[in-house]
Image (cartoon, grey):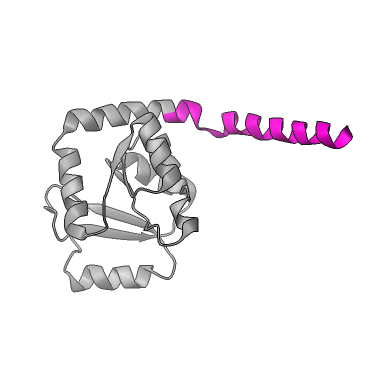
Amino acid sequence: MLFLDGARFHLLIVGGGDIFPSLEKIVFQNNLQEKITLIPKVPFNVLDHFTRQAHLGLSIDKPSVINHRYSLPNKLFEYLHAGVPVLASRLVEQERIINHYNVGTYIEDHHPEHIAQKIRDIFDNPAQWEQWKENTKLVREELNWENECKIIIDIFKQVERETVS
């Protein structure tokens, strides 16, 4: 946020954990109180309200270990189901979904200047952003619990048939 215009951009971070006190300290030390709002953990319905107000979701986890490289964060689905395009790191499964549905773009590294430039680029191209937003509708239709539970039930039925045989 040091590299973004506070009149144009505001970052909302909702959550908790061990990192939150460090984030509060960083915001204060860099005088970013006007650009960043930190909110402790909230119930899902409150989080969903915040998410639906967002213009861009960030999923920029570092692939520091193999588990992270292949992870698929819940926040990705929360953003997309709320109709919010994403800026993400290139995690294997995350990239697969973003590419397949064309709902966002990627950072190439975690340098703050680079991330800020990617955010500016996204909002300097409103037609692309609108297309990504429109494409999130297909994610909601296809990647949801109603569809996924059918797959799980079919797997259980197959295991049951193989066990009985």
Q: Quadrant of residue 63?
A: bottom left
Look at the image and say whether residue 11 sits in the magenta stretch: no
Kindly identify the residue that appears in the image at 24 percent across and 33 percent down.
129
Kindly identify the residue that appears in the image at 27 percent across and 27 percent down.
131
Q: Is residue 143 left or right of residue 94?
A: right
Q: Quadrant of residue 64?
A: bottom left
Q: Is residue 68 left or right of residue 105?
A: right
Count of numbered marks = 0
Kindly identify the residue that appears in the image at 39 percent across and 31 percent down.
100
**What x and y, as percent, mark residue 160?**
81, 35
Q: Nearer the viewer, residue 101 or 133?
A: 101
**What x and y, as percent, mark residue 7?**
11, 50
**What x and y, as percent, mark residue 16?**
42, 63
Q: Quadrant of residue 157?
A: top right
Q: Is residue 74 left or right of residue 60?
A: right
Q: Nearer the viewer, residue 129 or 23?
A: 129
Look at the image and say whether residue 164 sits in the magenta stretch: yes
Vertical placement of 141 versus 34: above or below? Answer: above
Q: Quadrant of the C terminus?
A: top right
Range of the magenta residues? 139-165
Kindly identify the residue that appears in the image at 31 percent across and 61 percent down.
38
Q: Main secondary structure of the magenta part?
A: helix
**What x and y, as percent, mark residue 111?**
22, 60
Q: Quadrant of the N terminus?
A: bottom left
Residue found farthest to the right:
164
Vertical placement of 31 versus 67: above or below? Answer: below
